[in-house]
Image (spheres, rainbow, N blue to C red):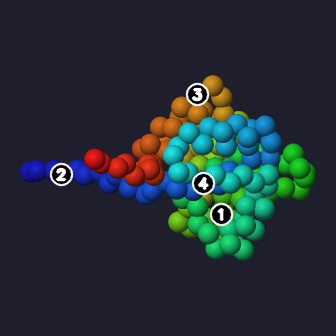
Amino acid sequence: MDINLSFTQRNKKLTSVYVIEDSQMDLNMMTDFLEKYPNLTVKGFPTGDSCVKELVMSGFTPDLILVDYFLDSESAQSKDGLEILSKLKEVSPNSDVIMLTSVDNPRIVDLARKKGALDYVVKGSASYERLDTIINKNFVLNTPPTIED
């Protein structure tokens, strides 16, 4: 008996990323990090609600959304990342979402995956390397055209 296993390679182009991060310093660092990818549009949001509002009002669907778990520095009543993840999947179902957070809790990782997160990255010394790996595995990077002589 022959068993043929095939794995589907995702070929989704990465042209736009939204970042939801309530720490301005972390938001700036993530935006700077993502700017290394050519032709990538990056937009940051200090709250999940502001990102959801932008998605609804603009009708734009970013390829990828990075969302922090704790989003309460601006307002104690802010929704957490899991609540925002559910809203994001509702209003922008074709956007992939990665939880990027300092919370290293298996229960929250499991809940994030069940709610539709593509992956979960714990902030730390290896988080940017891990994010690179996830992006390169799941997306085709939008490179500028080359002119052949």
Q: Residues within 10 Å of mark 2 (few under 14, many from 20)?
A: few
Q: Amino acid at mark 4?
A: Thr
Which label is found at residue 126?
3
| Mark 3 Cα-neighbour bin, 10 Å: few <14, some 14–19, many ≥20 | few
Observer able to see residue 138: no
**How far apart are labels 1 and 3 at the CA level?**
26 Å
Q: Nearer the viewer, mark 2 or mark 3?
A: 3
The residue beneath circle 1 is: 88
How far, Cα to Cα, is label 4 from label 2?
Answer: 39 Å
Q: Label 1 amino acid?
A: Leu
- Give the residue at x 45% y 56%: 13
Say which of marks 1 and 2 sits in front: 1
Q: Residues within 10 Å of mark 4 (few under 14, many from 20)?
A: some
Q: Which residue is mark 2?
A: 4
Residue 67 image position (x, y, % from top left): 68, 50
Image spot of residue 74 (x, y percent): 89, 50
Q: Earlier in the sequence, mark 1 or mark 4?
A: 4
Q: Amino acid at mark 2?
A: Asn
> What percent of the width, then of the height, locates residue 100?
65, 43
Q: Relative to residue 136, is residue 79 drawn left or right?
A: right
Q: Secondary structure at mark 2?
A: loop
Residue 70 in percent (x, y) is at: 77, 45
Assign a secondary structure to mark 4.
Answer: strand
Circle number at residue 38 = none
Q: Residue 64 sits in which quadrant? A: bottom right
Residue that numbered label 4 is attached to: 41
Q: Earlier in the sequence, mark 4 or mark 2?
A: 2
Q: Secondary structure at mark 3?
A: loop
- Spatial CA distance of label 1 from label 4 is 18 Å
Image side of residue 69 versus residue 109, left or right:
right
